[in-house]
Image (cartoon, grey):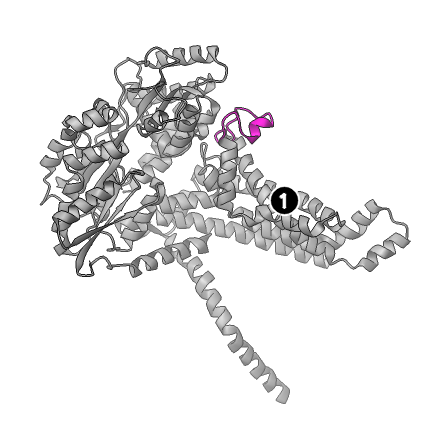
Amino acid sequence: MAALAGLGLAASMSSCRSERAHGGRSNGKIALVIKYQPLGEADAFQRLLRDFERDHPGVSVVAEALPTSSDVAHQFFLTALEGQARDFDLFIVDIVWVAEFARAGWLLDLSPFVAPSEVRRDFLAGLGDAVVFDDKTFALPWYVDTGVLYYRTDLVTHAPSTYQELIFAAERAMRERAEIGGFVWQGRQYEGLVCNVYEAIWGHGGETQQGGHLLLQTDAARAALHYLQSLLRTRVSPPTVTSAGEEEARRAFQAGKAVFMRNWPYAFAESERAGSNLRGKVGLAPLPTVTGEPGHGVLGGYQLGVNARIAEDKRELCIALLRHLTSRAASVELAIAYGRSPARRDAYDDPRLVSEAPLVAALRPAFERARPRPVTPYYMMLSDLLQGEFSAAITGVRSPEEALARAQALVDRLTEVR
Amino acid sequence: MQRARTEHTEKAWAAIMMAPAVLVLAAVALYPTLASIWLSFHRLILVFHEQRFVGFENYAFLVKDARFFGALGHTAYFTVLSVTAELVLGLGLALFLQAGPPARTLLRAAILVPWAIPTVVSARMWAWFFTQQGDGLLAALGARDIAWLGTPGYAMHAAILVDVWKTTPFVALLLLTGLVGIPPAIYDAAAIDGASRLRTLFRITLPLVRPVFVVTALLRALDAFRVFDVVYVLTEGGPANTTETLSVYAYKTMMRAGDFGYGSALSVMTFICVLFLAAGYFAWARWEENR
């Protein structure tokens, strides 16, 4: 293993060095390369790129897809950018990576072109804090995501607004139909679990951050973990939730095996697809809370950043492309074609969006309410520590109190050492 | 005098002939190992260009790190259980194949199929079996509604099951070569002496296949101790880190969290454990020989 690790490191460094700087001019045109995650089957994204080429003669834009797994994409950027790669100009950045990439010096400071105040004005609340550090803009928000509650309109009369209501409604439906499991969510030990736990903490009236510190040992956090654990213990949530990610939860819901589901908005398109057995039977609602106020979902989604190492004469063009892709018109196109929710506020007022992507338009309040996960360059380390302890709490390996105490100790060590 | 000189030149020639192999080995095995050990004495967060020498600080934390000892325990448990099961089942399979069942060539090829499938692919396939809610293969066997990969205690055994499923054929094939190597004359002699089949098995077959058996066990134990792919694909170490092995912990620390210093310390510990395992085996083998 030691040998393997050393080899891997050496290999990844050298391979990245060798791939530098081919993105310059090809057949007399300036080529811009953008690394993105596949958006869907429609060709709206390609059309947007062709529009840009038409407006900028002499420029060709090449879109290169990344793996869909966020972890794998993160690892790609880690090795490529650490290896000083210059073969791509623009790239997508998950909301939890921006601080890390900015600190590493991989993201071009965009402030001369897009002032922080402009970002805060034009984009949804919460996004400004995710892309602006030390009063500098490091990326532009592109599309957003947040946790919502799915419910079966044929099994319950209305969406529950409190946890108690959700539990009662799930139990009633399960009594009536033996094959139904109540409430599915993401309980596998991975980033999705961390999102579910944060949402439960906020739903119990708690905060997760104070100043620069992560708050874990609070009454709300203890209550949140007790609540999630009790869902499993009382079988309101089927035991398979402990190994479920987004897709596992979606498949169970899609197969008609759950009354409620916590997931990102993407699952809705699937349930409304022609031939789906759930078509017209699914509703979306804010996450429930203790008090019945609409809950806060975790703020997710992708930003676009510019590679800090590209040649200076390409920067203006990159900014132009960045502005083009995050424009109101482009945001509306992406929302209609792929169901991606715009990060830009004014896109939600667009009549085309309201008529052709009504779901996205309806989600706006959920995005306005969404909260960011802790913003820190060490997010990935932090999350790895929390995943194990949160998993221990919901599966009953440790009590919530013990799990939170352990997590706090680990996090404190991590932040102390810096 | 003359003879000593010849010996001398012969030795020099031997050294020259060996040099390329030694150099290659040093480059691909020794250098990375030493580099890892060197890294483990640093605090090294690659992306933030934080690099400073911290001596044994990483190891000082390691001996107090409950997660490390958890991972060590899980790795040992995985190794003991999976290798034992593979050896027992593999030996049974090898004896069966040696007995010459009908269509044995076809059978030999067929049992190798699980071994031929890349681990990542077969683990994905098993993950699918394990997570199908209510109507999968396991549900048909009466194991409805158990979260195989999400329940502490079950998840590790699920990983062991997949490893045994995949590797038993390989073990069987290795043991079969040992069985085939036993001279038929010995069996003939036993038959003439009127030894029963059971007696033949315990007095002839098993003692003679023993050297191959021991080497197979060693190979498998070294391999199992570094297990990564099966566990990573099935559970990523969850739930509650109960399936996290040393390799998975080291990988997460380095590649996901970006902490190369502590990750290297974990790798070095894995390396040392494997080294002890191998040394233990060899010491035992020598003792066996001299007995």
Q: Is residue B71 visible?
A: no
| Residue at 22% across, 27% down | A356
| Residue at 36% across, 31% down | A192
| Residue at 48% across, 40% down | B124
Magenta residues? Answer: B132-151
Asked if residue B136 is among those painted magenta in the image, a careful observer would answer: yes
Residue A365 is left or right of residue A381, and the answer is left
The image shows residue A141 at horizontal and vertical percentages of 20, 37
| Residue at 50% across, 52% down | B272
Quadrant of the frame with the C terminus of chain B: bottom right
Secondary structure beneath label 1: helix
Residue under pointer 1: B86
Three-letter amino acid code at disc 1?
Glu
Asked if residue A11 is among those painted magenta in the image, a careful observer would answer: no
Q: Nearer the viewer, residue A396 or B140?
A: B140
The image shows residue A272 at horizontal and vertical percentages of 34, 25
The image shows residue A334 at horizontal and vertical percentages of 23, 35
Q: Is residue A235 visible?
A: yes
